[in-house]
Amino acid sequence: MKTSDFDYHLPESSIAQTPSEPRDSSRLLVLHREMGQVEHRIFRDLGLLLHPNDLLVLNRTRVIPARIFAKKETGGRVELLLLRRRDELTWEALVGGKGLRVGTKVFLESGDSSRRNPKSGDFGLQAEILEILEGSERLIKFSEPIEPYFPTIGNVPLPPYIHEKLADPERYQTVYAREMGSAAAPTAGLHFTPRLLEELQASGVKIAYVTLHVGLDTFAPVTEDSPEEHKIHTEWCELSQETADLINQTKQNGGRVIAVGTTSVRTLESAAIENRKSKIVNTDHWSLVTAFRGPTSIFILPGYQFKVVDALITNFHLPRSTLIMLVSAFAGRERILSIYETAIKEGYRFYSFGDAMFIL
């Protein structure tokens, strides 16, 4: 297996720059794996493809406004993209700017003019570089907790391939987002509306939630010649006992567990693997998964045997990315590349604000 096996050409015009309005008006390419049949639908038709007793698993992470601007003591402008919170004051961040060595202090800029120092432009909040990590990543420490200042200093960190300004930052959040912590949105969930979720539940479809805080690996292509040599970023995830019970009940009752997004897939499969490792044996109660909370670095490649996920709702992913590799593991590499070629010809919109696939 080579990384180049997951490459394809995408015209720039196929990259969605703005989200569909309304959310569920985006297109939905349906792939039936067993027969190889393809359907072209609208996302709001999803209920026609689901059965009572199916379980949709949604990632309720919320994107933090993690893109922050600051100035060095010399006056040079700096950009910080917060990735992971280590403690109350300390974060791992991707930095843009020169001379950001250990000990460098930067002064954060504020959009609130009432708090801004007229001479320096900052408002008293500082950050110091504590450690140089990999590449442009740094460990930084703020002078006080940063979260209360997000409304005035934070910006939504849109992916680098989106060049249009987002009029409403909430359009880069799912309607069910609750748990702050992601550097990027779980984009398969962007197509759902409250009304669609209500209609699905009214028809007998169950809904469960997990949390996986999405890191930058979502946008990072695999640069190694062999995917097996790629080190995937570790991300934090959580699957509650309530969700575990719904999964186990669904499986026992013959329903399908449908992951909404690759982040939900990684959480579900991580929980199943951890459950097997712990060797929980209870003859009175069968369980495929139990509650799980902690880091995951699961990297799903073709050849992986899925333990929980029966169907997948996902967007169209970047070439050479870990995400297209995961989808290829679920539906077959050659089939996925063929489907992507069809989607391009049919005018589907790709990436974060693009259309969706439903792989059955």
Image: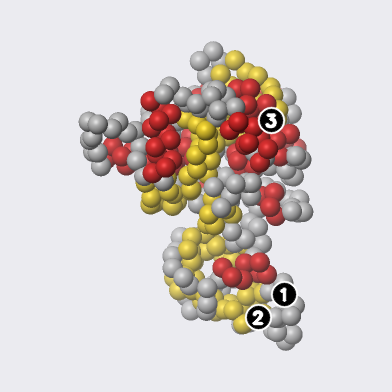
Residue 282, compared with residue 138, is above or below; it is: above
Q: Nearer the viewer, residue 145 or 157?
A: 145
**Residue situated in front as seen by the camera: 351 or 178:** 178
Q: Quadrant of residue 110?
A: bottom right
Could you tell which of marks 3 and 2 lies nearer the N-terminus? Answer: 3
State which tag comes first along the sequence, 1 or 3: 3
Q: Which mark is residue 112?
A: 1
Q: Amino acid at mark 1?
A: Asp
Q: At x 38% / y 52%, what residue is drawn?
A: 294
> Which residue appears at 44% of the width and 65% of the height?
86
The residues tagged by marks 1 and 3 sit, at their Cα atoms, a distance apart of 40 Å
Tags 1 and 2 touching, CB below 8 Å? yes
Residue to which mark 2 is pinned: 123
> As shown in the figure, which amino acid type bears the numbered disc 2?
Phe
Mark toward the start of the polypeptide (1 vs 2): 1
Q: Amino acid at mark 3?
A: Arg
Residue at numbered disc 3: 44
Q: Position of residue 54 (x, y in %)?
A: 51, 27
Label 1 Cα crowd, 10 Å radius (few <14 / some 14-19 / many 20+): few
Residue at 56% across / 71% down in the picture? Answer: 146
Vertical relation: 148 (above or below) 309: below
Give the foreground label among 3 and 2: 3
In the rendered image, the vertical position of residue 283 relative to residue 93, given as above or below? above
